[in-house]
Image (cartoon, grey):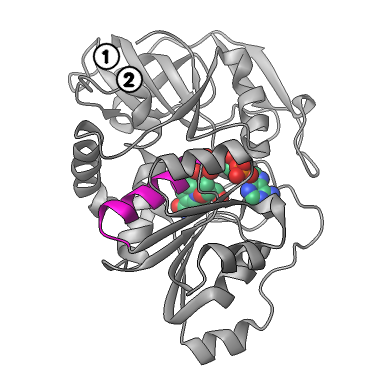
């Protein structure tokens, strides 16, 4: 089997030298364990945070150790009565092609039928769940709201914008990093979209949402957060989901100016979001969103890299915006 190890802690943008592909002998499964051949693995922005030391809601990866992450695969050998051979599972399996895991640590997936298995890593998995809990619970979305989402062409962002449209937003505005992404956002039902490279976010947002916004769903931070706080209505809500514009930064990224006076004068609610706080919403989310996919109301896009050797390029390219929709790495056929 092969697996990726963290070789060094990056300073700024990670490079291929920070990772090492290592050949390993996997152990025989013990009682209660399963051997899983991975079909696809996820690369996600939060992984950049695991590469650094420092305060975080999760422990950092250790140099010289395998890198963790969500993956889907098929059980090829089972020593557990609960998870039979042949079962499809979702696991925090790490960046590797074969994993020996405790049966209790994997989630058996129902047959996906007509839907690709990789959706369990994206729209029907952690990023989709993030979008659902963030918009509907943390953001307290209401029909008629004007919603602005940053990082709108990514896995979380493209879900947020479409969920808002499907639940009756009066307008949905998105920002993204290329003209192609902006065109795609309009195709999938965003009312307005802009490329944040085209000027100051504040000005671009004022053009796209001249009457202001009710909900800001932030994946980007920095200048986007500053601009959006200024555009929020009185009693507006901001969901702080991520701040990808800061993840590779080596210096402090300028954030909101006049934070206190904006908070007070507009009585804003600014809330941090962590998807793992909302397991109770999972079932409702999965049922609702798979319904929207099957009815054709929700557009799902993935960017797929092939082969374990391309996991690092996929991760580095994700941080640079090469993906539209969820970035996944396919390791084997279903
Ligand atoms: P995406 O699919 O959105 O991929 C990341 C995207 O970020 C890229 O495609 C790129 O698109 C954009 N990006 C990269 N650098 C910058 C920059 N400097 N400024 C603006 N945009 C940039 O990833 P996800 O959907 O998986 O994650 C989106 C956000 O949600 C991340 O911030 C992530 O950390 C966060 N998150 C938070 C969770 C939580 O529980 N709080 C759970 C899951 C995700 P572009 O071309 O538009 O620049």
In the picture, measured across the screen, residue 68 lies left or right of residue 145, that is right
Q: Determine which residue is flagged by label 1.
A: 79
Q: CA distance from mark 2 to mark 1?
A: 5 Å
Q: Is residue 83 above or below residue 149?
A: above
Q: Mark 2: few, some, or many residues within 10 Å (few <14, many ≥20)? A: many
Q: Is residue 151 above or below residue 95?
A: below
Question: Which percent across, then down, holds residue 12?
Answer: 79, 44
Q: Which residues are magenta?
A: 154-169
Identify which residue is drawn at 75% across, 36% down.
14
Q: Quadrant of the C terminus?
A: top left
Front one among 225 and 144 = 144
Q: Is residue 94 magenta?
A: no
Question: Which percent across, then down, holds residue 170?
Answer: 33, 64
Question: Of helix, strand and loop, which one carries label 2?
Answer: strand
Snapshot quadrant of residue 7: top right
Question: Which percent across, then down, holds residue 26?
Answer: 50, 11
Snapshot quadrant of residue 79: top left
Question: Of helix, strand and loop, which one carries label 1?
Answer: loop
> Is ligand 1 less than 8 Å from the beta carbon at label 1?
no
Q: Is residue 167 magenta?
A: yes
């Amino acid at each position: 089997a092969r697996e990726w190890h963290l070789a060094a802690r990056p300073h700024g943008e990670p490079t291929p030298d920070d990772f090492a592909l290592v050949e390993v002998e996997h152990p025989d499964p013990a009682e209660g364990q399963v051997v899983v051949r991975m079909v696809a693995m996820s690369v996600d922005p939060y992984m950049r945070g695991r590469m650094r030391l420092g305060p975080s809601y999760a422990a950092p990866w250790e140099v010289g150790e395998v890198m963790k992450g969500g993956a889907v695969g098929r059980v090829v050998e089972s020593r557990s009565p609960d998870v039979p051979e042949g079962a499809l599972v979702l696991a925090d399996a790490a960046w590797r092609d074969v994993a020996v895991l405790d049966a209790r640590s994997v989630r058996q997936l129902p047959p996906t039928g007509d839907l690709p298995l990789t959706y369990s890593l994206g729209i029907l998995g952690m990023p989709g769940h993030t979008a659902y809990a963030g918009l509907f619970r943390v953001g307290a979305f209401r029909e008629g709201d004007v919603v602005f989402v940053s990082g709108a062409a990514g896995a979380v962002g493209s879900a947020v914008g479409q969920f808002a449209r499907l639940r009756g937003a009066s307008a949905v505005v998105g920002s993204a990093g290329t003209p192609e992404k902006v065109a795609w956002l309009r195709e999938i039902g965003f009312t307005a979209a802009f490329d944040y490279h085209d000027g100051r976010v504040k000005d671009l947002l004022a053009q796209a949402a001249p009457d202001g916004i009710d909900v800001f769903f932030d994946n980007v931070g920095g200048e986007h957060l500053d601009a959006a706080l200024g555009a929020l209505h009185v009693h507006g809500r901001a969901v702080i989901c991520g701040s990808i514009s800061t993840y590779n930064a080596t210096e402090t990224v300028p954030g909101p100016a006049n934070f206190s006076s904006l908070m007070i004068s507009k009585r804003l609610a600014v809330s941090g979001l962590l998807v793992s706080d909302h397991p109770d919403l999972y079932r409702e989310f999965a049922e609702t969103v798979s319904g929207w996919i099957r009815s054709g109301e929700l557009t799902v896009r993935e960017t797929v890299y092939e082969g374990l050797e391309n996991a690092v390029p996929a991760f580095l390219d994700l941080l640079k915006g090469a993906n539209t929709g969820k970035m996944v790495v396919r390791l084997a056929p279903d």
